[in-house]
Image (cartoon, rainbow, N blue to C red):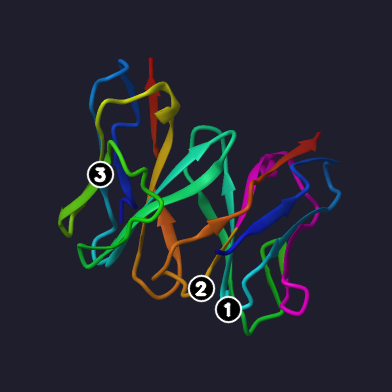
Amino acid sequence: GEQVEQRPPHLSVPEGDSAVIICTYTDSATAYFYWYKQEPGAGLQLLMSVFSNVDRKEEQGLTVLLNKKDKQLSLNLTAAHPGDSAVYFCAVSATGGADRLTFGKGTQLIIQP
Amino acid sequence: NAGVIQTPRHKVTGKGQEATLWCEPISGHSAVFWYRQTIVQGLEFLTYFRNQAPIDDSGMPKERFSAQMPNQSHSTLKIQSTQPQDSAVYLCASSLGDSDYTFGSGTRLLVI
């Protein structure tokens, strides 16, 4: 079945710097890609979803890149601020919304004030 | 729209007792998913329903775990004879079935 590797597991960057998280997946049939943010004691907050026909998507200081050739998905937070400190998960699905999500292990992001 | 509602938020049970977790999906969403989150294993798929029918329970432990969706407004996950290794955050998500998933805040289960 699908496997998703996420790196790094921990990331600490100064406020104002960029942070990059990368996921690789195995199933070439995967078509839907998601990034979630989880704050302590809370559920998963959807940051961005991308369909496989999109290579790049930008929203509110976040950039998602999808490289289907290398089966790689990345999340770039530009000008990070302390409120961005959280655990970030990538997730993939074959048929968005109608199938299970397979998650990466998560990245603990700390933004240093 | 109150989002996906999970109750209780926290539950403590004694080893061997039964635990029932509730999920109320967003009204109109046809798909409901259950996941388990632990530090060691991360987020694991358990089961899901579409239009109340069970579609895939391949992630459910074969013993002691069961899930139901008796109507479109709620789903339950029941764990019989709870064990310490069942301690986890159980997350429910719902979807219209065509794109995005909305997660609840989860139920943190502690088995002592």
The chain holding disc 1 is A
The 10 Å Cα crowd at callout 3, few under 14, some 14 to 19, many 20 or more, is: some
Check if mark 3 and mark 2 are on a common chain: no
Q: Which mark is residue A11?
A: none
- Quickly name the residue at label 2: A94
- Quickly name the residue at label 3: B66
Callout 1–callout 2 Cβ contact below 8 Å? yes
| Labels in figure, total | 3
Q: Amino acid at mark 3?
A: Ser
Magenta run includes residue B91 = no
Q: Which of A51 and B61 lies nearest the eye of the viewer?
A: B61
The 10 Å Cα crowd at callout 1, few under 14, some 14 to 19, many 20 or more, is: few
Quadrant of the rendered image containing residue B39: top right
Tag 3 secondary structure: strand
Q: Position of residue B44 (x, y in %)?
A: 49, 48
Residue numbers of the magenta segment: A66-90
Q: Is residue A9 left or right of residue B16?
A: right
